[in-house]
Image: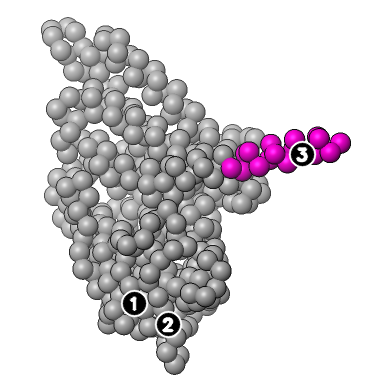
Amino acid sequence: MDFAVAPKMQDLLGRVRSFVQTELYPLESVFLLEGFERAEPVLREMRHKVREMGLFTPQIEQKYGGLGLSVLEHGLVSAELGKSPVGHYCFNCQAPDSGNMEILIKYGNQEQQEQYLKPLAAGDIRSCFSMTEPDFPGSNPTWMGTTAVKDGSDYVINGKKWFTSSAEGAAFAVVMAVTDPAAPKHLRASQILVPTGTPGFTITAKTPCMGHRGEGWATHCEVSYENCRVPQSNLLGPEGAGFVIAQERLGPGRIHHCMRWIGICERAFDLMCERAIKREVAPDRPLAIQEFVQGWIAESRAEINAARLMVLQAAWTIDQHSAKDARDEISLIKFFVANVMMKVLDRAIQVHGGLGITDYTPLAFWFRNERAGRIYDGPDEVHKIAVAKRILMRYHQELGAAAGA
């Protein structure tokens, strides 16, 4: 595996890094202290600047207006953007829009791409992904209660969703709903495009998470679908392919999340080291001379380096082979990197003392928001069980083959 970064890519990363540090770091306080709605006008200006720099939507193919970066290349960019809570948003590669762009490219027909993909890739609209339900476990996405029943040329959708992230202000939702309850469990659900202005689509609440409800893009919404009627032409991909599309969406998406978490780790590490040097516990006695702080710094550096290499390997495997071939690597990084991130954040907060739990730095924002990383896109336990089963199956097959020989 060759993770060498080409000169052209090094230049791009340098431009991204410089923009994040000089343009985005200074405006984070508005977002952290006053909320998304207050920050949105200046964030809109930043998005315009990024577009003028030719760096907008880096993960999308060039023919759709993006940079056409590979999974590995976008992973490197994502690690830089992850250093700011608004990095991905300003570059139009934020969840859930990035994943929705990917599935619209692969499964959307020409009309759907014209109506939904083009304005989404251009940053003119936002979207949401409506899958998780309050009455069913998110760890088993084949089991859900939301239904889409055919009526004439329409689907009539009924059900309740929650953690429909960024629904407030979104132009459309990608909805998972059961279209054939009698089919095998992996073929029961479909994905359907629902404009949020459709009668019967109602945001019933903004779910409070760790004491914060958020605003606009930075929300997790509860959505009711009550006799919500859309044309059957809004079906995304084949009927019954909802689970397959979701899995394809989540594979590269986990790479994006993990590299974003690496960026969070790097920013937290920088803040921790700077605080250790500057903060004195007595005259001429900075925190940096404390051996336990030195231990946290050494452990964090080793864990971040290991996590980064694991994610790069997974991204390389996807680029060279496929997401299916990288299943083990994807599962391993999903739980490993999320846990590294939480450990690094915890140490950084501890070094900052009381300042660490305020919103005067991004540490508290990440600590309360990114804890969910060990739950969404498959909880740690599911990934551990899945990868262990595959590993043991290979050993079983090898031992059986050896015995047969």
Q: Position of residue 115 (x, y in %)?
A: 42, 77
Q: Position of residue 336 (x, y in %)?
A: 45, 35
- Pick whichever of labels 2 and 1 is earlier in the sequence: 2
Give above or below for 393 relative to 109. Answer: above
Left or right of 141? Residue 4 is right
Q: Is residue 265 magenta?
A: no
**Crowding near pointer 2: few (<14 within 10 Å), some, many (20+)?**
some
In this picture, which residue range is highlighted in magenta?
389-405
Q: Is residue 404 magenta?
A: yes
Q: In this orientation, which residue lies closer to the viewer: 374 or 20?
A: 374
Left or right of 303? Residue 272 is left
The residue that appears at 29% across and 16% down in the rendered structure is 293
Under mark 2, the amino acid is Val
Give how far apart the Cα atoms at labels 3 and 2 are. Answer: 47 Å
Q: Which residue is mark 1?
A: 158
Residue mark closest to the camera, 1 vs 3: 3
Left or right of 216? Residue 245 is right
Under mark 3, the amino acid is Gly
- Pick whichever of labels 1 and 3 is earlier in the sequence: 1
**Crowding near pointer 1: few (<14 within 10 Å), some, many (20+)?**
many
Give how far apart the Cα atoms at labels 2 and 1 are. Answer: 9 Å
Q: Position of residue 211 (x, y in %)?
A: 16, 47
Magenta: predominant secondary structure element?
Answer: helix
Left or right of 225? Residue 302 is right
**Crowding near pointer 3: few (<14 within 10 Å), some, many (20+)?**
few
Is residue 54 visible in the rendered structure shown here? no
Please say if the residues under marks 2 and 1 sit with CB atoms less than 8 Å apart: yes
Q: Which residue is mark 2?
A: 149
Q: Which residue is mark 3?
A: 400
